[in-house]
Amino acid sequence: MQQTNERPDDFLDTLTGLVTSITLDRIPSSVVKAGRRILVDTTGVILAAMDEPQIQALAGQMAAASVAPCSMILGSNQRADAMWAALVHGTAAVWHELDGGHRFAGGPPATYAVAAGLAVAERQGVSGGKLLEAIIAGYEVAARIGLATTLRPGMDTHGSWPVLAAATTAGLLMGYGRNRLRETLNVSTSLNLASSNRTAYEGATVRNIYAGFGAAMGVFAADLVNDGFTGERDGISTIFGNIAGVFLDVDKVLEGLGQRWEIERGYHRIHACARCIHAALDALISISKRHAISAEEIERLEVRTYSMAATLNDAAPENPLAARFSIPHALASYLVLGETGLANYSQAALKNDRIRALARRITVRDDRGMTARTPSERPALVRVVLRDGRTLEASARLAHGEFDHQPLADDELSAKFLYLTSGLLGKQKATDLLDSLWQIDSAQDIAEVRPLFTK
């Protein structure tokens, strides 16, 4: 069932009318800054995964399959068709669970906009400013459709409505006006996946391909429209109101349009795990800063949190992806290793006897009161019971990095970028790339930055 106005596609006319009018000098400077921030952040998380063997193999396969290898695959010396480069970028962006998102929409528009945007911008030979405009527009379209969509139970957000971020970004970089962009969006809705969220819990890495596929299909949709293909008149309402989704609230798509920019309401991550875990981690970090405790001192550790997060309760994940969706592993690995980054989800961490033993003493419970506070809050309470009889407790209303709760400063995003990329690029090239991304709108052609993206 869907809620519509007299003409179901009026909302799409209005939405595409706004985003096709976006220029950096006509939108608030704070929105432009938010666009730069997601470009910096998402590029960093893409590059962080380029040394992973599966990503290297995928990049090689996509390069070999390309007929017109016009776009660089970030972090490599390989080139591919724009669609296949976007597939690699999108897959890499979610590999370490460090990409940003939007808590109200429940998904990551930035991942798709940047993954597709970097590939298409190079193919089209556009300026850095045009790339930034297209990314901002792609984020706005997808986030608003995400806000309005109630997906079917069990569907993973990846591969569904975020494809619209890639489609919008690609279409605008190809010079599309309102009509062709609307056509691109309607075509792209028929190219989304029936994706299962069980894959992440089980550690099935096909789940990471969902994001790559969505980014690629956004580019493909724009190319199909250029070839003369068409979509149904209001594919968004059909797919996200009746097929992939069970309800599309059109009023939410247009609420505050042009006054409230969704890109300013996104979050950035600092912990390399599922976002649902972050509030619990932040609460535990708060405890550990006040009290020096070791894993062996803990009798048991109890977590109360909202229902979606409470499902992440596997105390013995079998592989790195499953570990990134395990509250017991995330908290235990923090207490043993003293960090929350890439090392926590390595094979060494999975086999660490101290982490495994502590994870078995961590319980996770659904709290209905906390669930009722979502999505305005994503809370967690952590209680640590020590063997000496003491009980330590802390809670977090929201995770660090939200726009309205401890947002990351620019220098924190820069530090994250250098942490993720210096090993691949070398510290000097990583620093030069970072500086160029912060000033991307000064590049007359995105090709000016190209040499900095590779080893």
Image (cartoon, rainbow, N blue to C red):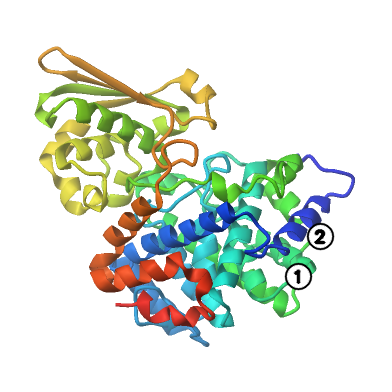
**Quadrant occupied by the C terminus:** bottom left
In the picture of the structure, the residue carrying the numbered disc 2 is 233
Q: Residue at x 63, y 48 (%)?
A: 261
Residue 193 visible in rendering? no
Q: Position of residue 340 (x, y in %)?
A: 26, 44
Tag 1 or tag 2, which sits nearer the N-term?
A: 1
Q: Residue at x 25, y 49 (%)?
A: 345
Q: Amino acid at mark 1?
A: Gly
Q: Position of residue 324 (x, y in %)?
A: 32, 45
Does residue 109 sit above or below 75 in this rendering? above
Residue density around tag 1, few if under 14, some if 14–19, many if 20 or more, within 10 Å:
some
Does residue 304 sit above or below 236 in this rendering? above
SS state under label 1:
loop
Residue 113 visible in rendering? yes
Q: Position of residue 339 (x, y in %)?
A: 22, 44
Q: Quadrant of residue 181?
A: bottom right
Disc marking residue 177:
1
